[in-house]
Amino acid sequence: MFLKASSPLARIADLSMRLTPASVAKLLVAGRRARYGDRRVDPRGQIAGRFFTALRIPEDQKGLDAFRAFFDTLGERGGFTGTPPVAARDIDMPLDGRDLTARLYTPQGAPENGPLILFYHGGGFVLGSVRGYDPVCRRLAATSGYRVLSVEYRLAPEHPWPAAADDARDSWDWVQRHADRLGIDAADVVLSGDSAGGALAMVIANHAAATPLAAQPAGLALIYPAARITLETPEEQALVASELLLGAKVLHWFKDQYAGDRVVATDVSVSPALDEENLRGWPPALILTAGFDPLRPGAEFLRDSLSAHGRMVELHEYPSMIHGFINLGRHFDEADDAIRRIAAHAQRCCSLRRQTQLEEKQQ
C-alpha cells in the first residue's frame, strides 16, 4: 500500500499509535512479528515501521515538501509529553557563503558559561528539521540541565553532498567562536545527533581530531548513527529486508538525493566510522542502537574500532526497537531512557574534562 505523506496523515498515525495499546498491537502482528536472532521487535514498533515504508517516495518538489511536513509533524505529535518548561530562541548562524539558523534551548537553572550539547537531527540528509526535533531537544535540555543547540543544516536534493558535512564542520567552528553569545564554555561542548545527524557529529569529531591543537569536543552521544553506509554485510541486508522504517526503497532514495554519483559510500564524509586515523583522537563516546535497525552493525563496527584504538566507548542496544524511536517518546519508554543516558553521558564527559584540566594545572 502506497500513501502520499502529509501532515494530516502524520496526525492520524500518531493518533492510531496512541489508541493501540501494546496488547492490541501484539494481537495485530501475531504470527508476523519480526525476529532477528533472539530479538523480537516491539509490536507497535513493527506497525510504525511498516507504516513508514509503505509511504510513497515523492517524485517532485511538491511531494517532497509534503513528505517533510509529514516527518516534522510526526516528530512534534509523537514526541515527549510532560517536559518541564525550557526557554528556546532561534539564532542566526552566518557562515562562509550562506546563513544557517539554530535553536538554543536553555533549561531552568542552566549555569552561565556552562556546557552545551550541540545537536544535529536525522532524516537521511533529506528530511528533518529543528522544528520536528523540538520535543527531543527540549527533553534533552531539561534532563541534562545543559543548553542544547539544534542546527538547521542544509538538506538534499537542493543541497547535496558535501553541504551537510560542510555545515556541520562550519557550525562547530562558529560555536567555538561565539561561546560568549551562547552563554557557554567552549571547552564543554558535547556532540550529539541521531541517524544522519549522528554521522554529522562524527564528521565534526574527526575534523577536530585532525587538528589536535584546536578546540576539541568533550564527548559524543550518538543515537543510531549512520556511521558506515556501505550496508553490505549479510546482517545489514537482512535488516534492510525487514522493511522496518529503513527499507531498501527509503535507503536508496536517501542515497540518491544526498550522495548520488558524487561520492562513494566508503568516503569518510559519509561513512565517518571508516576514518581510522582520526578515530584515535576521539573523546569518550556513547552509542545507542536499535535491534531492528540496518545501521546497527555499522554502529557496532564503530564501537569496536574505537575500543581497538583505546578510546572510551559505551554501546547500549535497545533490542526490540526500530530506527527512529527517539522521535516517538510519547509511545516508547525506551526513548526517555535514551535521553537519560545521553544526559548522564554529557554530564560525565564535562566532569571528566574539568577534572583533567585541573590535574594539568596542578602538575
Image (cartoon, rainbow, N blue to C red):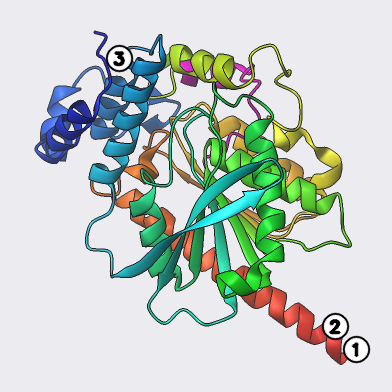
Q: Inspect this view and state whether residue 222 appears.
A: no
Residue 241: mark = none
Q: Which residue is mark 3?
A: 54
Instruction: Tell me the mark number nearer the camera, choosing from 1 and 3.
Output: 3
Q: Which residue is mark 2?
A: 360
On screen, residue 359 versus residue 48, left or right, reads right
Rendered location of residue 152, percent (x, y): 51, 45
- Around disc 1, counting alpha carbons within 10 Å, would you say few (fewer than 14), some (14 to 19), or many (20 or more)? few
Q: Is residue 235 magenta?
A: yes
Q: Which residue is mark 1?
A: 363
Q: Secondary structure at mark 3?
A: loop
Q: Are marks 3 and 2 in contact (CB under 8 Å)?
A: no
Q: Are marks 2 and 1 in contact (CB under 8 Å)?
A: yes
Q: Is residue 345 magenta?
A: no
Which amino acid, mark 1?
A: Gln
Q: Secondary structure at mark 1?
A: loop
Provide the residue span drawn in magenta: 221-240
Q: Label 3, label 2: how many angstroms apart (C-alpha)? A: 56 Å
Q: Label 2, label 1: how many angstroms apart (C-alpha)? A: 5 Å
Question: Which sits earlier in the primary sequence, circle 1 or circle 3?
Answer: 3
* Front residue of 333 and 229: 229
* Image: 130 above or below 243: below
Where, quadrant-wise, is the C terminus in this rendering?
Answer: bottom right
* Front residue of 107 and 174: 174
Rendered location of residue 172, percent (x, y): 68, 54
* Front residue of 217 and 360: 217
Report the residue at 40% width, 9% height from top. 59
Which amino acid, mark 3?
A: Ala
Residue 25 figure quarter: top left
Which amino acid, mark 2?
A: Glu
